[in-house]
Amino acid sequence: MTAPQKNQQCALLSRLYDMKQKQLLQASQQADSLRYRVLSAEADAISEALKAIR
């Protein structure tokens, strides 16, 4: 993967992670713990993908 591609993918994953964190915040204020756990798992997966790229 070239440097520009890495930067582009990193930027995309960062935006996805930010959006997932907003969803997590909203879910934490509701009673649906399954939704929160799913969103948390997705955020963790995005975070791990970011770490792998860097």
Image (tube, grey):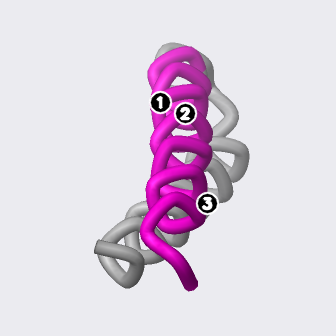
- Count neighbours of disc 2 (C-alpha within 10 A) and say few if under 14, some if 14 to 19, many if 20 or more: few
Q: Is 38 rendered above or below residue 50?
A: above
Quadrant where the image shows the C terminus: bottom left
Residue receiving disc 3: 42
- Count neighbours of disc 3 (C-alpha within 10 A) and say few if under 14, some if 14 to 19, many if 20 or more: some
Residue receiving disc 2: 15
Q: Kindly indicate the quadrant of the structure image that contains residue 30.
A: top right
The residue positioned 56% from the left and 84% from the top of the image is: 1
The residues colored magenta run: 1-26
From the top left corner, tell me how far across and down residue 12 is, in percent.
61, 44
Q: CA distance from mark 2 to mark 1?
A: 5 Å
Residue 53 versus residue 24: which sits nearer the camera?
A: 53
Q: Secondary structure at mark 3?
A: helix
Magenta: main secondary structure: helix
The residue positioned 49% from the left and 67% from the top of the image is: 6
> Are circles 2 and 3 on residues that touch, CB within 8 Å?
no
Q: Secondary structure at mark 2?
A: helix
Label 3 sits on what residue type?
Glu
> Are circles 2 and 1 on residues that touch, CB within 8 Å?
yes
Q: Is 36 rendered above or below residue 10?
A: above
- First in sequence: mark 2 vs mark 3: 2
Is residue 11 part of the magenta span, yes or no? yes
Residue 28 versus residue 6: which sits nearer the camera?
A: 6
Residue receiving disc 1: 18
Q: Is 52 rendered above or below residue 39?
A: below
